[in-house]
């Protein structure tokens, strides 16, 4: 909260309004029951309080000492919200208000209607900015989660034998997470031509000898997720696989070497994209090079061709170039890195080499 108030002063923000979201979890350790009943945390320089349905107040009280402004279904939220805004000093002329971009639209409209003269923005310059700079404790949590993911990836490839289905491999990966104190976040298991779909839905497709395998998986441990993609093949690699893998390995290395403090994010994307384009596969790289990772699997900073974000100490993001050849296979190599010192440190300790599965 102290860091937020410093940032609010730096950005000229008078009021921050946060809905029941990962922003609220990060800022207050509070994850209230989410439904249509308005819930919001409002922060000013001298006050912070929570608009809270009375129905959920007792359970939420276990997680925070912040003052609640409760309201009942019979009375509605307007009076409680007015009291919270008054306590927050929201009657200031020319108020600069930062709204949670992830909150429900009807919650946001309550604030907009209550503060019609306020100048409005979203949280990217305040809470979002702070969340993008991971501290030492967050680094440790992300590193631990990444190491669990290394083991889950090994378990997935060990299960990927000819005849097995994508869903059966996904079940093995999910079981590994649970056995090692993590919760499954996502398990993209892609056999053969399904790897050419960047966001394939894991299904009944069964693996055959000579086909490619792509695993994009992540679990959550101690509140923080992991995310990694590796590839392999059953028996013999399909034609062109090794060439594409080598191109992507060079692209990953180039992006990692480029990602340093003071570098615009778009140059990291360019480093990977140039390698792929020069190799003749530019039209088959279908997405950005990366996304931030924190409490959310996708959060700032985003590593795109147009991003002007300047990389700074503590930024955590993926580097995941891919080449997708329709009706053949797709290859994506994904690392999560943190900007530390003068370089990008990879969190995983699992090699990126292709895994050969016995046919």
Image (cartoon, rainbow, N blue to C red):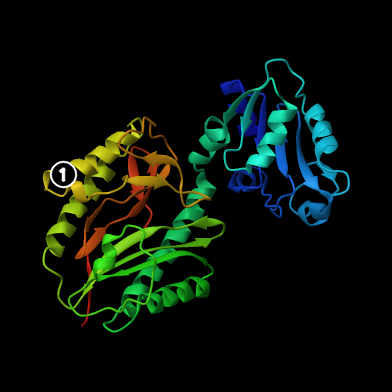
Judge by depth and name the residue closer to the eye, 140 or 25.
Answer: 25
Residue at left 33%, top 37%?
Answer: 342
Residue appearing at x 60%, y 43% in the figure = 23
| Residue 19 appears left or right of 275 | right
Label 1 Cα crowd, 10 Å radius (few <14 / some 14-19 / many 20+): some
Q: Is residue 349 visible?
A: no
Tag 1's secondary structure?
helix
Find residue 96 and report its image quarter: top right
- In front of the other: 226 or 290: 290
Q: Quadrant of the C terminus?
A: bottom left
Image spot of residue 306 (x, y percent): 33, 33
* Side of 266 where 327 appears, left or right: left
Is 60 rendered above or below residue 147?
above
Location of mark 1 (residue): 277
Up-down: is 349 above or below 202?
Answer: above
Please say whether residue 276 is visible from this viewpoint.
yes
Please indicate whether residue 95 sits to the left or right of residue 74 in the image. Answer: left
Residue 15: x percent and y percent?
68, 28
User: Which quadrant of the structure image shows residue 206?
Assistant: bottom left
Find residue 173 and report its image quarter. Answer: bottom left
Q: Position of residue 45 (x, y in %)?
A: 71, 26
Q: Quadrant of the N terminus?
A: top right
**Taking 46 as reference, is 177 above or below it?**
below
- At a point 84% along the width and 45% down the height, the residue shown is 71
Residue 91 picture location, percent across and down? 77, 20
Q: Observer-nearest residue: 89 or 46?
A: 89
Instruction: Give the side of residue 272 with respect to residue 341, left or right.
Output: left
């Amino acid at each position: 909260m102290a860091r937020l108030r410093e940032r609010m002063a730096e950005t000229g923000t008078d009021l921050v309004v946060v809905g029941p979201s990962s922003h609220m979890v990060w800022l207050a350790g509070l994850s209230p029951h989410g439904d249509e009943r308005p819930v919001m945390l409002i922060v000013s320089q001298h006050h912070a309080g929570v608009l809270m349905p009375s129905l959920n107040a007792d359970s939420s009280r276990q997680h925070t000492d912040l003052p609640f402004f409760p309201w009942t279904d019979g009375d509605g939220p307007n009076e409680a919200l007015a009291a919270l805004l008054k306590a927050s000093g929201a009657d200031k002329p020319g108020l600069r208000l930062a709204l949670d971009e992830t909150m429900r639209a009807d919650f946001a409209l309550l604030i907009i209607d209550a503060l019609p003269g306020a100048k409005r923005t979203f949280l990217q310059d305040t809470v979002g900015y702070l969340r993008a700079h991971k501290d030492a404790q967050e680094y440790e949590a992300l590193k631990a989660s990444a190491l669990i993911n290394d083991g889950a990836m090994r378990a997935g490839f060990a299960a990927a034998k000819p005849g097995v289905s994508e869903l059966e491999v996904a079940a093995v990966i999910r079981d590994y997470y649970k056995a090692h104190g993590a919760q499954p976040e996502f398990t993209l298991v892609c056999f053969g031509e399904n790897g050419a779909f960047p966001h394939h839905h894991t299904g009944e497709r069964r693996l055959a000898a000579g086909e490619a395998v792509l695993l994009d998986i992540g679990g959550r441990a101690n509140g923080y997720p992991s995310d990694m993609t590796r590839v392999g093949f059953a028996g013999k690699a399909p034609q062109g696989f090794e060439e594409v893998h080598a191109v992507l390995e060079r692209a990953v290395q180039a992006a990692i070497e480029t990602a340093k403090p003071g570098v615009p994010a778009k140059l990291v994307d360019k480093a990977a994209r140039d390698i792929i384009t020069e190799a003749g596969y530019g039209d088959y790289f279908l997405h950005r090079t990366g996304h931030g990772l924190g409490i959310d699997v996708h959060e700032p900073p985003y590593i795109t061709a147009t991003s002007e974000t300047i990389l700074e100490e503590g930024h955590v993001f993926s580097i995941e170039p891919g080449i997708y050849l329709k009706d053949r296979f797709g290859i994506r190599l994904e690392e999560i890195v943190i900007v530390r010192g003068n370089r990008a440190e990879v969190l995983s300790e699992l090699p990126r080499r292709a895994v050969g599965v016995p046919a």
